[in-house]
Amino acid sequence: MNRLWKPYYRFESIRVPLADEMFRGFVDGLHGSTVGLRYDFSSFAAMKFEFRSITRPGLQRFNGGFVQTSFTF
């Protein structure tokens, strides 16, 4: 595999305590995974291809594909 292509994986888990009144109404919790592949055009520009799967308690699972371009200067 070329050095310009970089695979990655991220797992996210958010748990909001019952006593936390500020966030309890907005986010009950979240569990998700992201798998992706990053391509570096140069040291200043990159493109990412991602697949995300997110599950919220009491709701269905959400899946989606995403493409992102980023620049640094």
Image: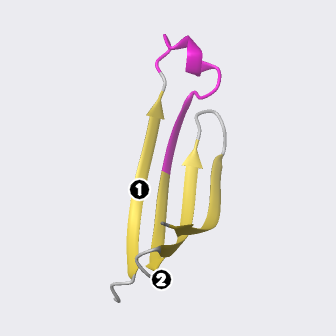
The residue under label 2 is 41
- Residue 29 located within the stretch drawn in magenta: yes
Left or right, 12 with reference to 27: left
Q: Identify the image quadrant of the N terminus.
A: bottom left
User: Bounds of the magenta span?
Assistant: 17-32
Q: Residue at x 47, y 35 (%)?
A: 14
Residue closer to the observer: 33 or 57: 33
Q: Position of residue 42 (x, y in %)?
A: 44, 81
Residue closer to the observer: 35 or 45: 45
Where residue 10 is drawn, which disc sits there?
1
Label 1 to label 2: alpha-carbon separation: 22 Å
Left or right, 33 with reference to 56: left
Vertical relation: 25 (above or below) 29: above
Q: At label 2, which amino acid type do we have?
A: Phe
- Residue 14 located within the stretch drawn in magenta: no
Q: Residue at x 49, y 10 (%)?
A: 19
Q: Are marks 1 and 2 in contact (CB under 8 Å)?
A: no
Q: Position of residue 66 (x, y in %)?
A: 62, 65
Q: Position of residue 27 (x, y in %)?
A: 59, 29
Q: At label 1, which amino acid type do we have?
A: Arg
Q: Residue at x 59, y 38 (%)?
A: 56
Instruction: Give neighbour class at mark 1: few <14, some 14-19, many 20+ (Cα, 10 Å).
Output: few
